Amino acid sequence: MPDRAHPVLQVQDLKTVFKTRGGEVHAVNHVSFSLQPGELLGVVGESGSGKSVTMMSLLGLLPSPPAMNKGGKVLFQGKDLLKISPNELRKIRGGEIGFIFQDPMTSLNPVFTVGYQIMEPLRRHMGMSKEQARKRAQDLLELVGIPDAGQRLKDFPHQFSGGMRQRVMIAIALTCDPKVLIADEPTTALDVTIQAQILELVKDLRQKLGMAIVWITHDLGVVAGIADRVMVMYGGQVVEMSPVKEVFSKPLHPYTQALLQTIPSLRGPREARLRTIDGQPPILRAEPTACPFMSRCRHAIARCGIENPKRRELSPGHDVACHRAEELIAEAAHV
Amino acid sequence: MTDSINTAKAAAAAASYRPPRNQWWDVWDQFRTHKGAMFGMCVFVLLIALVALGPWLWDVSATQTNMRMRNKPMSWEFPLGTDQLGRDILARVIAGGKTTLAVGLTAMCLSITLGATIGICAGFFRRADNILMRVTDLFLALPLLPLLLLMVMLFREPLVQSFGPELGIFLLIVTAIAMTSWMNTARIVRGEVLTIKEREFVLAARSIGTPARRIILRHILPSVLSPVMVAATLGIANAVITESALSFLGLGFPPDFPTWGRLLQDGMPYINLYPSRVLWPALALSSLVLSVNYIGDGLRDALDPRIRGR
Amino acid sequence: MLTFALRRLMTAIPTLLFISLVLFMVLELSPGDPLADMPLTIPPEVREKIRLAMGLGEPWYIRYVLWLNNFFVTEPMYWIDGTFGTDLADGRQRILSYQTRSPVFDTIGERIPQTLKVVGTGMIIGICLAVPIGVISAYRQYSWFDQIGTFISMIGFSVPTFVTGVVLIVIFSVWIPNDSAFWLPTVYDTGLKVTSWDTFVAQVRQMILPSAVLALYYAAQISRYMRSSMLDNLSQDYVRTARAKGMSEKVVVLIHVLRNSMIPVVTVIALMIPGVFTGAIITETIFKVNGIGQQLLLSLQGNDAPMVLTITFIFAVLIVTFNLIADILYGLLDPRIRYD
Amino acid sequence: MSEQRPVTAQKPLVEVNGLKMYFPIHAGVLRRHVGDVKAVDDVSFTIYEGETLGLVGESGCGKSTCGRAVLRLYDPTAGSIRIDGQEIGTLSQSQLRPKRPLMQMVFQDPQASLNARMSVAAIISEPLDEHTKMSRDEKLARVYELMDAVGLNRDFANRYPHEFSGGQRQRIGIARALALNPKFIVCDEPIAALDVSIQAQVVNLLEDLQEKLGLTYLFISHDLSMVRHICDRVAVMYLGRIVELASRDTLYDAPLHPYTEALLSAVPEADPDAIGGKQRIILQGDVPSPANPPKGCNFCTRCPKVMEICKTVKPALKEHQPGHFAACHLLEDGTAARQ
Amino acid sequence: ERGADGHVNVLYWQAPSLMNPYLSGGTKELEVASPVIEPLARFSPTGEMIPHLAEEIPTLDNGGFAADLKSITWKLKKDVKWNDGSDFTADDVVFTWQYCTHPEGGCAQLSKFHGVEKVEAVDAHTVKVSFAEPKPYPYATFSGPMQPILQKKQFENCLGTAAPTCTEQNFKPIGTGPFKVVDFKTNDVVQYEANPYFREADKPAFATMTIKGGGDPEAAARAVLETGEFDYAWNAMVAPEVLAQMTAAGKGKAVVSFGTLVERIMTNMTNPSSQLPEGERATVKHPHPFMTNPAVRKALSMAIDRELLVEVGYGETGKPTCDFVPAPEAYAANNTSCLKQDIEGANALLEEAGYVKGADGIRAKDGVRLSILYQTSTNAVRQDFQSMIKDWWAEIGVETELKNVAGAVYFGSDPGSPDTLVKFYADVEMYANNFDGTDPAAYLADFTCEKVPGPDTGWQGPNYNRICSEDYDAMINELNRTADPAARQALAKKINNWLTVDNNHIIPLVHRGAVAVHGNSLGGVILNSVDASIWNVKDWHRVK
Ligand SMILES: Nc1ncnc2c1ncn2[C@@H]1O[C@H](COP(=O)(O)OP(=O)(O)OP(=O)(O)O)[C@@H](O)[C@H]1O
Ligand SMILES: Nc1ncnc2c1ncn2[C@@H]1O[C@H](COP(=O)(O)OP(=O)(O)OP(=O)(O)O)[C@@H](O)[C@H]1O
Ligand SMILES: [Mg+2]
Ligand SMILES: [Mg+2]
């Protein structure tokens, strides 16, 4: 089990706002979480719930304008990433924290060879010679399971299949032995057999290299397969944070519960009809003063409309942001 | 809180039967919010107004020579001065604007229509592609001047006879300019069409059973408007300059027909002596091109609902 | 790629033949008389004699075939003779200009260097200006730099070169006194041979004004393309990837984005290059540079059909070639494009 | 919804026989035809009225091509396609036009398949413009009706696609497909681009519509759990060929083909308890190029149970149990694939 | 002293295309060739003949010109050498005749040998030119800039069809003049250096000369007067006030010389209406509906203020004129009757002729409106003239439509083009023309009946007006028979008046001078518009 006392990455009260022509969009509101060394944190949540924005604002990767950081702290090795100079931040990006993006098809620069793109951070961050960098790049490609790595370094991204491109992205993220790897839906665009390959690969790598991973996904199945802990996001907030087993066995937040019910299962009895979550996700024009899930929540009460619930730890390592969490547990137990 | 939601819902319900309105209104709404475009529009309207209403506001002949008033500087009587024959420059700028605007806009429209049509056909119909692009090469290679001479020789008389000297030569010039300037538009549009036709919404239209010509009109054409806009901006400048070159060569309007390009050229010998003679038409010309450019920018944004939303 | 090029070249041949025919017909049918320059005092019967001596007595198709034969057979022979000292041509009739009564290729060969020098310099300077302007305008979209850049490039495009050229002359050659170091010549001395530092300076000085006029014109256009291409690319995902890798802004913009943005721009430039060879008619005339453009204008005015036909046909060849080169460049620059 | 319809009792609506869709590859200076991308290679299946046939498989295996060829968005290389008893495989595009209302398509990417420059009303009424002579008001009424049917607020008629969430966009696409009262709809991965919580909405909608309007679907997807939910029968494709076709329950419970097995095992389960139970089969390597498929069984390069014969002889699709087709040499001698 | 003054820079805004005047009749070619190849005699600015390669001018008095008017004998200078060092002989003169009269040569100066039966070398330094018929004016041959003598040795192989292929010869002719060609770039620049064999030992003062071509008149004037890059610019036709402003800079001055060039309006005696079938349009078959009326022509002429035209268009470089032949003095009629603008008179005249103003202010008679299509070539000054004249004609109730045509088409003789000078598909047309400044007989003879162009002549013929008058033809016949100078002059004046003030077939506007500008440091410039403008380049020198 990871060491909970010394997180590698600690995010406190992060808040990010987009300035757009239609007004402000409060995409991330007071998000806090921490990441233990060697841990794999799964992040789930509806599309637009702020998963990507949160992770990107950690490293200042959002274009500004329109994005603006409105407070919070991101502690990494004792430094606040939001405060340090661009130069230092650059060293950390790619050097200490690796990033894998959502869409492997467009995230690689089409006009540079894969080798160049892998070697670039090696040469710039670690000052390796061309030869050394090439050697290392080849090792990395082999590590992520691309056959004939030496040859393929000379290929361009479009010559790789989607799954292989995603592996190249992983290789790039791993170049400088990062302490933390942030993977933003790395398998969503891939089909199941390739996804399975990548999941295996990540499990493998984690064992070999021992880094902490943040894994964003929609797919609860994936989370169930690899995560240690799960963070559920909704409306720019973290609504639930729990060890992976408990999310599936004992989801506390109504959103998590609803989410789990929408997915059909491969085995077991087949429901006649899928459950859905009615209503629309909120558009965050201002900082929410109410629970953002309220309008879609079956259990909403008046209080939900007045006060945005704080995140509370209900059982060890399992926090939730819902006014009625305790009641609902009791109810569930009762039923 | 709930109240406000309810009222909002009620309002939405009330509005819900508002029939869909013409999409051009949306475009206009967006267009209005584009600062640059509105600025360009103002300048453009101003120019049009100057040209359209100018003859009423400034009731001086543009061609009447007045030998006693030659080369006068700016004054109340002659707001922009007079030229070497004592003709009032303001009146000439106004009169020239009429021709220039008409020629520039019509030639540009013709040229981009031609260019867009050929570009779309080349991009959309694979079989036509090769031949159309080779035709484009041919036109690119054609020397303008002999071609114009040829056109003037063949068509000036019949046109002048059927439409009178003004309209006849106007038609001739406008077609001549359009004929020789559509190639770039065609090339750009073709490139764009090649990518757009692979997009899924075109396939969707085909699955509905929309025939090719309506796919082009409804789906392809609006999507290639943005490069066409750029071409249009450059096209106006090009048309105006070509027109002036034509009159310089004696292929254009009759000599007593001022146009901005011609004023510019007439003023050139005097540039050192009376720089304002070059300045005014140049200014008019630049503001025309600039305003069209900004309008094009705005229109491009306004035509794209994705940008429009923001 | 090679087969693509070969295939295109094969279609190019009939295309070019057809173009040459159309060019010939246009010149043939358009009014204008190579003798228009001659004084009115020359009586008609003498004119007729001269016309016959020019070969105008033959029917058009014979002249066309003769021209084709000359262009594709005789002239290359002369060229080979000139280069290798052989004697293939054996004094065959070459393409003669009506105006100068000399082989058009000699004239063209004499003039191309100037055009390449002046227009080429103008274009290179234009590109060198346009690329950074385009990059900065896009990187700081809607900043004052961008706005001013737009404004200037529109002016550069809308004011004809015959105005900008003369304005520059008035400023740099008339207002500035002759003895000043900033004074610049307005007449291009084509006899100047660069043999020393001084002649080199003189050469540079006489190229400044014409090249500046052209540079403004080219820069105005290319910077527009550059800007929009940069804007397209700056919002791409791979830019974010590069940033996430910890690359500095300089590397991100100047290596990753620029390389991608250059792809369409380079092809646009490639398509502009044929224009360098035909020269810039107006600019060359204003500054009296004896380039191809000026020659073309003179020949057009003089109705010198063989010269016009040859120059425009060479231009057509260049257009077709550079179209092909642009396509190939596209393929080389953009590894995604494959021709097969 | 009624469980498990008796398959045989129904009338076939779509019959596809020996469908081949090759994209020619030209090369050389003379653009000679040097080969084909065999995107769909000899596929046959039948869809009965009112049922949903699932088509699953890896990316690039030819699912979309198959769906499009069935609707004659491509001109198939060979094979016959009969819809409602009428052969459409050989009709010209203009002869086909009057048949279009019968068969429609819902696309994978709702963003890309809607013209961003058209308002919702315009998009939905496009098929009406093409195939009916309704007046403006009638059209508008029909648009509202359709919007109601797919659960879109009528107020949205004036909006543009980018102003909608993915699920709503897909509803617009579905409304467009429904506009002409088709009998048969090809759904080309209609939910792949959507968020999980929205996927359910769309799937429910499709099911409701099927029930109400008696629609027939060809449901293309690579989400096996969703296919299990919505389809009556499922066909599994690999590299342009159908390797297994069976009723849903049979296929999921007792797959015959090694590829189907691997596919099923690769699906991550959102149930932590299930993880331990089942050993995943991780396929090695990439799918071969359809331009150059292996000589024998298409799957032989990655098959965990490959035999010598697989590398030389293409197995035929045979009915091994009633209604259960598979193409695998392992099954030839009657041995089940599963040990 | 020869070559002491270094280099002189000359600018011609029209660039020369070759250096052989026999292959191009263009003025620019004559000009650049004139420092190199010389005729037997040149004309001074006032029209007197000055022997160059000839010892003296042969006349009736000194016996060089035979009394039967059928031959002329030139004595050549003895000490003349070609600039390659070889001797100049009578053979070269004979050769030049052969060269130009070769039936396949396409010689532009062929008309100068019109009537020449034979040219023979009497001895090495005597040439006899014999005419088929008596020739009252025999000097057209071998004098003036158009017929310089070519070196036989150089051009021997360039006869007939070979003429145009002799590029080297046509670009670098060997001559006897003060300069020799070092380098010729066609349509661009000619480099000269002093001819070491030139017969006058101390000339030219300049060691080298450059004649650069290209640009436009303004730029040429600017390069001399404002930027000072050039010493001399030819034909600096710029607007008077611009010229004034440029000379005000103090770097140089303008010089003017008047030849015989007259800007004029020609009236069309035939109907150019496009309603007529092609082939009958503008032919004698259809007389012009109103231009044939002398009163109309006269009114048109009266309405013009020539002084003002000069002031606007030419300033010092033009003079208002009523004459078709304004020079040389002996031939000039010096009419002044038209110089005063008389709008009222013109109105009255038209009124009297029965043309009354309609509601639109345009006069008409019997349904024929005085509506005129007025064409000319494209040229800033001509367009200014058009505008002014249109205004004046409007004042007398004549409507004018203006048209300008590119010079290359207008002055061409392409029978396919409707826009040429000679087709004259307009009511009036404006251009300038001259003769070589010595004898106007041929020039005046242009308007005989047989010279009317039309479809039958392939639209050839100089009688653009389509005048066909027995009186006129008779006068011309008489002129061709008269040898006595005084009688010739009187007759020429009579013909001139017949064409202009009497009948107003030709409406002369401006007697145009040639203008050149030169820097203050260039001395010895005497402008000549009868011969080459730089005819005396050997005398040019640097002013210290
Ligand atoms: N550039 C931007 N300008 C304005 N709003 C933005 C911008 N980028 C993101 N947003 C908003 O921020 C919110 C969070 O977006 P984010 O991309 O983090 O969602 P996500 O959880 O990653 O969704 P997905 O699962 O679809 O990737 C969304 O509401 C989105 O509209
Ligand atoms: N127009 C075409 N020309 C050539 N090859 C094509 C064309 N369209 C598709 N293909 C090829 O046919 C094969 C099947 O493509 P198809 O789109 O049908 O796959 P798919 O199963 O739908 O995949 P996905 O799940 O990614 O949508 C692929 O290899 C593809 O490259
Ligand atoms: Mg995201
Ligand atoms: Mg697909």
Image: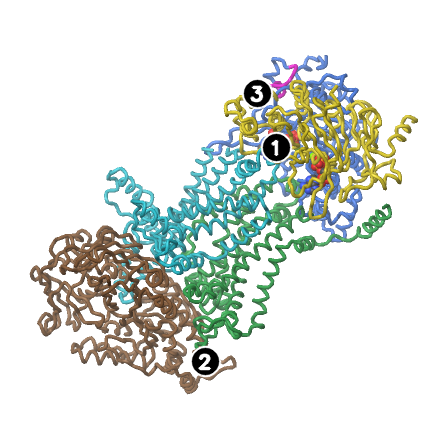
Chain colours: A yellow, B green, C cyan, D blue, E brown
Numbered disc in front, either 3 or 1 = 1
Few, some or many C-alpha atoms within 10 Å of disc 3 (few <14, some 14-19, many ≥20)? some
State whether discs 3 and 2 lie on one chain: no
Amino acid at pointer 1:
Glu
Residue positioned 55% across, 29% down in the render: A124
Label pair 3/1, CB-CB below 8 angstroms: no
Q: Chain of mark 3?
A: A
**Residue on which the image places disc 1:** A88
**Residue on which the image places disc 2:** E395
Q: Is residue A319 above or below residue E170?
A: above
Amino acid at pointer 3:
Asp
Within the magenta stretch, is there residue B179?
Answer: no
**Residue on which the image places disc 3:** A139
Q: Chain of mark 2?
A: E
Within the magenta stretch, is there residue D301?
Answer: yes
Q: Residue furthest front?
A: A78
Mark 1 → mark 2, Cα distance in angstroms: 86 Å
Residue positioned 79% across, 40% down in the render: A280
Q: Which residues are magenta?
A: D294-305
Q: Is residue C174 above or below residue A27?
A: below
Q: Chain of mark 1?
A: A
Numbered circle sitting on residue E501: none
**In the figure, residue E373 lies in which quadrant?**
bottom left
Q: Earlier in the sequence, mark 3 or mark 1?
A: 1
Instruction: State the residue in front, E362 or C204.
Output: C204
Mark 3 → mark 2, Cα distance in angstroms: 96 Å
Numbered disc in front, either 3 or 2 = 3
The quarter of the rendering in which ligand 2 is drawn is top right
Instruction: State the residue in front, E132 or C268.
Output: C268
